[in-house]
Amino acid sequence: MRFGKELSNKANTGFDVVYFECSRETQHDIISSRRNVYLIIFYLTLPLFLKAGGWTQPKGNLWIKSAVFHQSTNERFCNGQDATSLAFQQIGCNEPGNRSAFDPFIGGELTATAIYTELAYGITDYLEAGFQLPFYRIGFTNLSDPDRSPTTNFGDLRLRMKLQTSEQPFVSAISITLKSPTGEFTNDAEIVNVSEGQWDIEFLGEISKSFWPVDGYAGIGIGYRIREDNVNFEQSVENEFIFRAEVGYRLFRQVLVKSDFDWLRGGRPTLFASDEPLLWKRELLSIAPAIIFEPLKNFQIETGLRYSIAGEDYPSGYQLILGISYNLLVW
């Protein structure tokens, strides 16, 4: 397991999926004068602290990471309600999951940057504590408001405990993550950050395998996120199912390549005014290849790209990722 422990420190690129809700007026909205579009920003992997797989930080080891994510897109994955609209059908949204413009009349472009700072500390060789704090800059413009200023704010604090439960034949772990509404919640008419401003609790189980003496590893994780409703929204914030898989291989002593596959599926939201479910679910499948360099001992630089393969009621496109991390023994 020597290689597995070592590799987990270098491949730990975990960040949660972050999403934003953007409201826009359209001429075809059959539910209200506002429509909802989600912008997803991943912080270096799907849910928080994700990519250590089943491994935990060794006792006394502190892992520090900062990562920047950037996405700019003018397309989204259609939802079931869009597919019933003739206007959306004319721009290619004939069924849920098709890619189309944000709006058939005024278009739209989302530009977002997220910066995440994260710490993980090994309390023992099998118990790890972590914390994460994000900062966002999100902009949404369209033909009716081409000069709209972006929104910037800190996000909610996330705290996590992770317990490694076995080493053979697979390394396995369970973790719990709590998101506290401590950030500056911006309830904007056009840009609403639906991942911030309410309590969330996430449960995650992971299994991983190091193929030592081959310098490679693989792992999967399955989780469930329970989300509290937010009184600032006109609809419920539904719970989410999470699946992820990761493989990695060390090409050279200082170069590691890896790829993540993530699947996020949320339930259908309900309108508070009528207590009726809306006509769509929310789902996203993405893949994220990356290269990790280690120019100095315990110091890593990660560059990657996350591409949205398929989805429903989420923006499409890709995200650019750049992160740096450092490991040090503090006790």
Image (spheres, grey):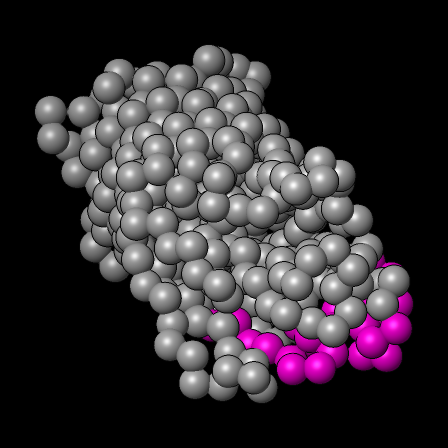
Task: In the rendered view, tell whether residue 8 sits above or below residue 316.
Answer: above
Query: Is 88 one of the magenta-colored residues?
Result: yes
Task: In the rendered view, tell whether residue 22 sits above or below residue 130.
Answer: below
| Residue 61 in sight in this render | yes
Q: Residue at x 39, y 22 (%)?
A: 162
- Quarter of the image for residue 4 reads top left
- Quarter of the image for residue 83 reads bottom right
Quarter of the figure that contains the C terminus: top left
Judging depth in this view, the residue of 323 and 281 nearest the camera is: 281
Judging depth in this view, the residue of 243 and 22 nearest the camera is: 22
Q: In this rendering, would 103 be left or right of 196? A: right
The x, y position of residue 91, in whole percent, is 81, 79
| Residue lying farthest to the front in this orientation | 273
Query: Is 29 one of the magenta-colored residues?
Result: no
Judging depth in this view, the residue of 306 and 116 nearest the camera is: 116
The x, y position of residue 168, in whole percent, is 52, 15
Q: Residue at x 44, y 71 (%)?
A: 139
**Total residue callouts:** 0
Quarter of the figure that contains the N terminus: top left
Q: In this rendering, would 273 be left or right of 21? A: right
Q: Which residues are magenta?
A: 86-111
Q: In this rendering, would 183 be left or right of 69? A: left
The x, y position of residue 177, in whole percent, is 41, 28
| Residue 321 in sight in this render | no
Q: Residue at x 67, y 67 (%)?
A: 76
Q: Residue at x 51, y 31 (%)?
A: 228
The x, y position of residue 188, in whole percent, is 44, 61
| Residue lying farthest to the left in this orientation | 331
- Quarter of the image for residue 35 reads bottom right
Dominant SS type (magenta): loop
